[in-house]
Image: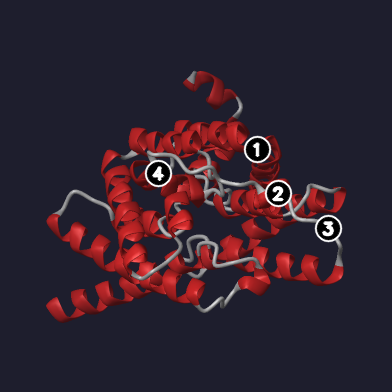
């Protein structure tokens, strides 16, 4: 199978780009993510493929570093733009065009920050999607997708499934199976990252419940997915890694709950992964200060 990917490196790069949504440079992780997305919605699956391919193709045509393209660094923000637009809106011709253009633009913005050596994570996706959602809401009449209005049926296993639902919601998937597949996908690439992410999802659900957030949305994983990403960033086998994971996760949860409670970003579609990005930035800043003082 590895020979197949060597013969068609573009597919390999696209799959790695999808895997990088949860910071995993692993084609099999990306493939499992893709399967989980298609299980939730074929529109989201096609959108992810189109936007990730657009971002990767743009990076190749603009002759960005081969090592960065091969690592999937120009695919993950593009992938999230695609899945977000197809999740939020009915997939009209305009939405499909924006999915492709948004994926290409995500790669260009990602490259700018990579050149500046600034770790922006999913920030290009956030900015592009906020602008597009605001514009589409104010200047078009494209209706929301059916996924937004679909009712979640509660089960006796909701408390147990909350932890993996946090993985699912990273890529806008509320299905139980998608969440489990995403967890397994991260686990095969990095067991440590997957287990830290699982713990973070539980912590996000617990702290948000103490803060009085809606229990249905907590069970869906909506208050855990940002924490999952923050935990994965700092995950590692050192004892100190656990401390940084805890700091990043708690900061992310506090920011997430604050933004949701105050309805800060509803006009642009929601918080998306913004709490993860800000929580991670603050933790990296604290980490640098700690290393400077210690040194």
Residue toward you, 7 or 272:
272
Q: Which of labels 3 and 2 is toward the front? A: 3
Q: Earlier in the sequence, mark 3 or mark 2?
A: 2
Residue hosting label 3: 142
Q: Earlier in the sequence, mark 4 or mark 2?
A: 2
Dot 3 falls on a residue whose secondary structure is loop
Q: Residue at x 70, y 38 (%)?
A: 46
Q: Which of labels 4 and 2 is toward the front? A: 4
**Label 3 packing within 10 angstroms: few (<14), some (14-19), many (20+):** some
Q: How is the image coloured?
A: secondary structure
Q: Earlier in the sequence, mark 1 or mark 3?
A: 1
Residue hosting label 1: 41
Q: Earlier in the sequence, mark 4 or mark 1?
A: 1
In the image, taking residue 243 as reference, residue 2 lies left or right, namely right
Quadrant in which residue 228 is drawn = bottom left
Residue toward you, 21 or 93:
93
Q: Which of labels 4 and 1 is toward the front? A: 4
């Amino acid at each position: 199978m590895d020979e197949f990917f060597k013969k068609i490196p573009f597919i390999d790069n696209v799959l790695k780009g999808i895997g990088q949504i949860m910071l995993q440079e692993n084609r099999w992780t990306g493939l499992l993510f893709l399967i989980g997305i298609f299980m939730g919605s074929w529109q989201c699956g096609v959108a992810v493929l189109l936007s990730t391919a657009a971002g990767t193709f743009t990076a190749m045509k603009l002759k960005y570093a081969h090592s960065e393209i091969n690592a999937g660094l120009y695919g993950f923000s593009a992938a999230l733009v695609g899945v977000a637009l197809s999740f939020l809106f009915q997939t009209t011709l305009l939405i499909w065009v924006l999915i492709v253009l948004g994926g290409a633009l995500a790669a260009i913005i990602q490259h700018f920050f990579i050149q500046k050596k600034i770790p922006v994570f999913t920030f290009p996706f956030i900015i592009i999607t906020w602008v597009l959602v605001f514009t589409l809401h104010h200047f078009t009449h494209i209706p929301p997708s059916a996924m937004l209005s679909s009712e979640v049926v509660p089960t006796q296993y909701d408390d147990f499934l909350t932890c993996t639902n946090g993985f699912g919601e990273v890529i806008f998937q509320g299905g139980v199976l998608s969440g489990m597949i995403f967890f397994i996908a991260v686990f095969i690439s990095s067991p440590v990252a997957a287990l830290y992410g699982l713990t973070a999802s539980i912590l996000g659900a617990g702290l948000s419940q103490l803060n009085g957030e809606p229990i249905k949305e907590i069970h869906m994983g909506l208050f855990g997915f940002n924490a999952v990403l923050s935990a994965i960033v700092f995950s590692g086998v050192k004892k100190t890694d656990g401390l940084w994971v805890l700091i990043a996760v708690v900061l992310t949860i506090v920011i997430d709950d604050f933004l949701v409670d105050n309805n800060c970003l509803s006009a642009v579609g929601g918080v998306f992964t913004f709490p993860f990005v800000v929580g991670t930035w603050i933790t990296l800043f604290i980490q640098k200060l700690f290393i400077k003082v210690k040194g």
